[in-house]
Structure formats: structure tokens, C-alpha cells
Image (spheres, grey):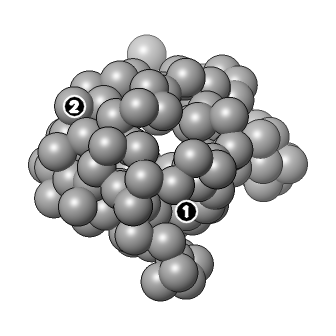
Amino acid sequence: MYNHIWKKYLPFINIQLKRSANGDQVMNLNRVDFERAGTGRKAGYKFMIQFTEGRVSNVISGSALAMNLASVMLEDDNTKKILKQSQYEISLNTKFQLLTKNTRAAKAPEEETTEDKIETPEPEETEVEK
């Protein structure tokens, strides 16, 4: 039902996914596109999709809009590559703003251990090697 609309926005969604590593991203969508394609509801649509390692990790069965977005994103090879790199939350609010969050980017520094930071010194030359 909404696939053709999401396909139109997909290149911009990919850009948002990439930029979300530096902070949350917001994109304003055209409300009229969705109202024409949908049931004609004037009230806003609202959903949240969580992607973990290239898969939807939450239940979105109640929203055709969300299910269509998830299927369009997972059908596109470029988008799938981006989604496999991290964890993302994509949500739509009642103002038709699509919000993209990279949920793993914020956690990355905490996951780093002191073992990861230790550098092994270069072996020194011995008298025999000279």
C-alpha cells in the first residue's frame, strides 16, 4: 500500500542511517503522500521499528505503514548493508517526521575495554640479531 512512497524516500533514509552515527536524524515527510495512499485518515501515523544486525527486532504488526517501510528497507541491498553494521531505531511521529537513531553508536565507547586499548610494544633488537 505504501511501498511506492517509501521507495521514493529510501535514498534519503539511507543517508540518515549513515549520518545517525554522529547523532539523531530527522526528516520531514509529505503528509499528503501518505493520506492519498492510505485510508484517508487525517490524524498522524505513529510507529517505531528497531533493526538489529539487519533484521527487525520488534513487533510491528499493528502498522501497515511500518511493515511496508521495513519490507522496502530489507529488500534493498544497499540499505541491508547499512543496517547490518549497527542497531537502529526508526520512528514516525504524528507530525510526519521520520526519526533515525543509531542505538549502538552511543554505546560503543562503554563497550571498549582496557584490553582493547593496550598496545603491544615492538620487540627490541637483541645483540644476536644485530
Query: Looking at the image, which residue is at 53% across and 81% down?
Result: 62
Q: Which residue is mark 1?
A: 49
Label 2 SS: helix
Marking on residue 8: 2
Alpha-carbon neighbours of circle 2 within 10 Å: few (<14), some, or many (≥20)? few
Which quarter of the figure is the N terminus placed in? bottom left
Alpha-carbon neighbours of circle 1 within 10 Å: few (<14), some, or many (≥20)? some
Q: Nearer the viewer, residue 130 or 40?
A: 40
Q: Amino acid at mark 2?
A: Lys
Classify residue 2 as left or right of residue 130.
left
Classify residue 13 as left or right of residue 60.
left
Label 1 SS: strand
Query: Looking at the image, which residue is at 41% across and 32% down?
Result: 32
User: Measured from the top left, where is residue 13 in percent x and y?
Assistant: 39, 32
Classify residue 123 as left or right of residue 129.
right
Marking on residue 129: none
For marks 1 and 2, give the CA distance: 19 Å
Q: Amino acid at mark 1?
A: Ile
